[in-house]
Amino acid sequence: NAGVTQTPKFQVLKTGQSMTLQCAQDMNHEYMSWYRQDPGMGLRLIHYSVGAGITDQGEVPNGYNVSRSTTEDFPLRLLSAAPSQTSVYFCASSYSHGPHYTFGSGTRLTVV
Amino acid sequence: GNSVTQMEGPVTLSEEAFLTINCTYTATGYPSLFWYVQYPGEGLQLLLKATKADDKGSNKGFEATYRKETTSFHLEKGSVQVSDSAVYFCALYNFNKFYFGSGTKLNVKP
């Protein structure tokens, strides 16, 4: 099925551990983004990409890295997890010419 | 700058009641406006959108009108159902970025 696929759905990390949240889309979308969702704060943009090889920071980029080596994949890396990164993470993609974002089903991350 | 303000929830209604969820925005230029819905345990789904002033977005009985003069995009539905229970997010899209409101939880009781 076409869409945005995020893995894993759930993850528990210890403080200081690193991990990568995976995001893949099969719609040939140029635009991809990562958001975090925290209670009472809506969704906040972490990083985004307007095409393969191009990434930029969003509203809350600290503690996260991204890369975009292919159009399909946009992984989010946590270098040294902190409890403040406990959140639900959403990946989204869109055509380059319009904001028709498709969201993944999310990754619930807990850092203890 | 760009920002979205939504009414705080939760909103609790009885089935068949009228729903309004307020959303106001600040933006430069000419943003597009959206409502997304998130059902329990799921990701966000686009509910409706409007791309220019005076446009009305509609879907599944929900409506919202892009009001530039009042910088608002209020969500309405004439008769809610239990299945409408979810969190609703108002969002603004401008210069290749989304700006989301904090979300409003709707509980509909039978």
Image: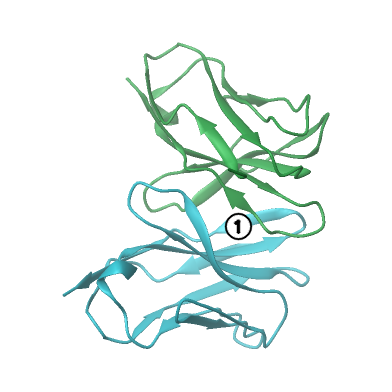
Q: Residue furthest top?
A: A17
Depth order, front residue of A2/A30:
A2
Label 1: state its secondary structure.
strand
Would residue B1 be seen by someone viewing this image from the given angle?
no
Residue A111 % position (x, y): 37, 22
Chain B's colour? cyan
Considering depth in this image, is B82 or A12 the residue closer to the camera? B82
> Residue A104: x and y, percent?
53, 43
What residue is at 45 percent from the left and 69 percent from the top?
Answer: B6
Relative vertical location of residue A67 with respect to residue B70 in this rendering, above or below:
above
Could you say which quadrant of the image residue A28 lies in?
A: top right
Q: How is the image coloured?
A: by chain
**Residue B53 appears in which quarter of the rendering?**
bottom right
**Residue B38 in picture, x, y percent from top left:** 42, 56
Is the residue marked by circle 1 packed among few (<14), some (14-19), or many (20+) residues within 10 Å? many
Asked whether residue B55 is in view, the answer is yes
Who's the residue at 37% across and 56% down the image? B39
Q: Nearer the viewer, residue A82 or A24?
A: A24
| Residue at image mark 1 | B99
Question: The C terminus of chain A is located in which quarter?
Answer: top left
- Residue sticking out furthest to the left: B110
Query: Picture quarter containing residue A77?
Result: top right
Residue at 83% of width from left, 29% of height from top? A53
